[in-house]
């Protein structure tokens, strides 16, 4: 495996391990602050960016469908 690909895999594994360690915190205030940091760290990866874009697109389509449907009486 080329060194470049190995480094990429190592970065992904490192980010996932840090994310898992942060997710296990028990203090609610600490967890809330870490959630913001986790999202920022993980959003650097293309697959996460694609997933967030898909989620946003789905939410928008649901909102427009809900507005378009007339209420039944």
Image (cartoon, grey):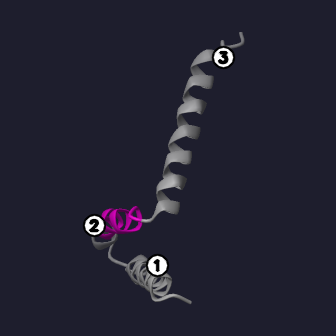
**Mark 2 neighbour density, 10 Å: few (under 14) some (14–19) many (20 or more):** few
Residue 29 image position (x, y, % from top left): 28, 68
Q: Residue at x 41, y 67 (%)?
A: 42
Circle 1/circle 3 CB separation < 8 Å: no
Instruction: Find the magenta span and give its range.
Output: 32-44
Q: Is residue 70 above or below residue 56?
A: above
Question: Would you identify the image quadrant in which residue 41 lies?
Answer: bottom left
Q: Is residue 53 above or below residue 25?
A: above
Let me know if residue 41 is in the magenta part.
yes
Q: Secondary structure at mark 3?
A: loop
Q: Which residue is mark 1?
A: 12
Return the mark for residue 69.
3
Let me know if residue 66 is in the magenta part.
no
**What is the magenta segment's predominant secondary structure?**
helix
Q: Which residue is mark 2?
A: 33
Pick whichever of labels 2 and 1 is earlier in the sequence: 1
């Amino acid at each position: 495996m080329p060194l470049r690909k190995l480094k990429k895999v190592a970065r992904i594994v490192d980010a996932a391990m840090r994310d898992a360690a942060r997710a296990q915190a028990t203090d609610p205030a600490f967890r809330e602050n870490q959630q913001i940091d986790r999202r920022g760290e993980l959003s650097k990866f293309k697959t996460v960016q694609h997933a967030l874009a898909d989620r946003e697109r789905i939410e928008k389509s649901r909102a427009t469908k809900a507005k378009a449907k007339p209420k039944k009486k």
